[in-house]
Image (cartoon, rainbow, N blue to C red):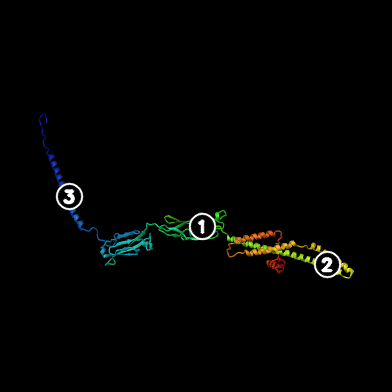
């Protein structure tokens, strides 16, 4: 446009043709999209009709239980109800069980498994806790015996009520024994929900020579020594507390206590040996005293014979002098006057040569009395039975008597060189002549 003039541009025919081609292409694309959409709808309808008329899965060729549960864990006092299903028409089949525990049932027509785990089954022993029951189950065609299936499942019962296991000794809680005696009892177990598997033992005082208890029904045996109770223990007795600790697999424990009171007692085997040794020593000492008595008695017999000879000589001399003094002969009368003096003079000679052995006589009598007393004490304190309860008392009495006699005869020389046997000594000691000689005279 120049000044006030308007300059008109000529119309471009090529631009109009380009636009027309674009419109034609656009229309064609839209028509194609519409036709494709209609074709898809037609296919979708046909495909839908095909799926609706055709089956989803082909029919199974093998009979099987389609919902088998291989494991059932059942609480006591609960109800079990489980419906088994098969891939066939259930009206043409029947169900059965084998090796089923007490109370377990199945409906033969529809395969409904039922069971009520009543506690009475377990209390009566028909069922057990924590035990795997393998149950065989099967289903079979009513018309075709070959058309069947057999399988199994496992049934386990558990109980949430825990019954503790206890340790039960076969004796009371307190025992009283003497030293040297043997205490023996068994350790039993009262089995609960979980049995006791091992037992530990402990003692309040260290002991020895006992049998160790490790499990139920083991026997505990113990013999306390004779020196177990000391003189410093109060009441001459000692108390021992035994602990038996039982535990199950969960390490739950139960403890049983047994108290044993051990009293001071006699060591009888040692006391018996002491008694035998003492009686042997007394018997030997008696033989020595008998030989000593024999020697003393022989000395007394020889001295008595000498004195008797002097007495007879003096008496005969005096008697002869008396007779001669009455004679008619003067010489005989003179001799008769001298002879009595000669007889009297023999008395001091007798006392000088063979003095009276009063001491020896008394010693012989004392020795004989001691022998008789020891023999009586041995007889009076002899043991009665295999285990004389008075053995210590009798032993002490014999020992005191032996010591007392040894003190009494301490001044008498005891001759240990004995050339005579026991039989010869007893024959001499118990001879009638000796008994008459030393017999007490009233």
- Residue carrying label 2: 318
x and y percentages locating residue 274 in the rendered image: 61, 60
Residue drawn 16% across the image and 48% down it: 34
SS under mark 1: strand
x and y percentages locating residue 374 in the rendered image: 66, 63
| Mark drawn on residue 37 | 3
Marks 2 and 1 sit apart, C-alpha to C-alpha, by 92 Å
SS under mark 3: helix
* Badge nearest the viewer, 2 or 1: 2
Task: Report the quarter where the C terminus lies.
Answer: bottom right
x and y percentages locating residue 55 in the rendered image: 22, 58
x and y percentages locating residue 355 in the rendered image: 78, 62
Above or below 1: residue 78: below
Q: In the image shown, does 261 or 189 lie closer to the viewer?
A: 261
Q: In the image shown, does 371 or 425 lie closer to the viewer?
A: 371
Marks 1 and 3 sit apart, C-alpha to C-alpha, by 104 Å
Using residue 309 as the reference point, say whether residue 250 is left or right of it. Answer: left
Q: Is residue 292 visible?
A: no
- Residue carrying label 1: 260
């Amino acid at each position: 446009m120049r000044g006030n003039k308007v300059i008109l541009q000529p119309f471009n025919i090529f631009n109009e043709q380009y636009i027309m081609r674009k419109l034609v292409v656009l229309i064609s694309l839209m028509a194609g999209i519409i036709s494709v959409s209609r074709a898809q709808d037609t296919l979708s309808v046909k495909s839908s009709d095909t799926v609706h008329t055709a089956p989803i899965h082909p029919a199974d060729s093998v009979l099987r239980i389609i919902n088998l549960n291989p494991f059932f864990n059942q609480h006591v006092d609960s109800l079990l109800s489980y419906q088994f299903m098969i891939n066939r028409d259930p009206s043409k089949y029947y169900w059965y069980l084998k090796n089923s525990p007490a109370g377990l049932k199945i409906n033969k027509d529809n395969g409904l498994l039922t069971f009520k785990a009543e506690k009475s089954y377990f209390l009566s022993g028909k069922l057990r806790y924590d035990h795997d029951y393998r149950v065989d189950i099967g289903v079979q065609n009513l018309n075709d015996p070959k058309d069947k299936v057999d399988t199994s499942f496992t049934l386990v019962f558990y109980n949430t009520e825990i019954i503790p296991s206890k340790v039960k000794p076969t004796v009371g809680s307190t025992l009283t024994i003497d030293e040297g005696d043997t205490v023996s009892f068994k350790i039993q177990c009262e089995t609960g929900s979980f049995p006791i598997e091992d037992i530990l033992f402990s003692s309040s005082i260290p002991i020895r020579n006992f049998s160790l208890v490790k499990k139920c029904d083991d026997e505990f045996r113990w013999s306390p020594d004779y020196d177990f109770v000391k003189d410093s223990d109060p009441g001459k007795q000692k108390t021992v507390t035994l602990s038996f600790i039982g535990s199950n697999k969960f390490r739950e424990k139960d403890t049983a206590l047994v108290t044993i009171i051990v009293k001071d007692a006699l060591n009888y085997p040692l006391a018996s040996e002491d008694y035998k040794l003492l009686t042997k020593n007394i018997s030997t000492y008696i033989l020595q005293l008998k030989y000593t008595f024999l020697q003393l008695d022989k000395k007394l017999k020889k001295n008595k014979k000498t004195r008797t000879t002097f007495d007879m000589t003096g008496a005969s001399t005096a008697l002869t002098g008396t007779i001669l003094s009455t004679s008619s002969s003067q010489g005989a009368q003179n001799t008769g006057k001298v002879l009595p003096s000669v007889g009297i003079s023999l008395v001091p000679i007798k006392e000088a040569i063979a003095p009276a052995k009063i001491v020896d006589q008394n010693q012989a009598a004392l020795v004989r009395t001691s022998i008789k007393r020891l023999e009586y004490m041995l007889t009076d304190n002899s043991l009665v039975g295999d285990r004389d309860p008075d053995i210590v008392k009798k032993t002490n009495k014999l020992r005191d008597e032996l010591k007392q006699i040894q003190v009494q005869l301490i001044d008498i020389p005891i001759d240990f060189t004995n050339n005579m046997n026991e039989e010869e000594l007893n024959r001499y000691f118990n001879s009638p002549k000796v008994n008459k000689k030393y017999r007490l005279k009233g």
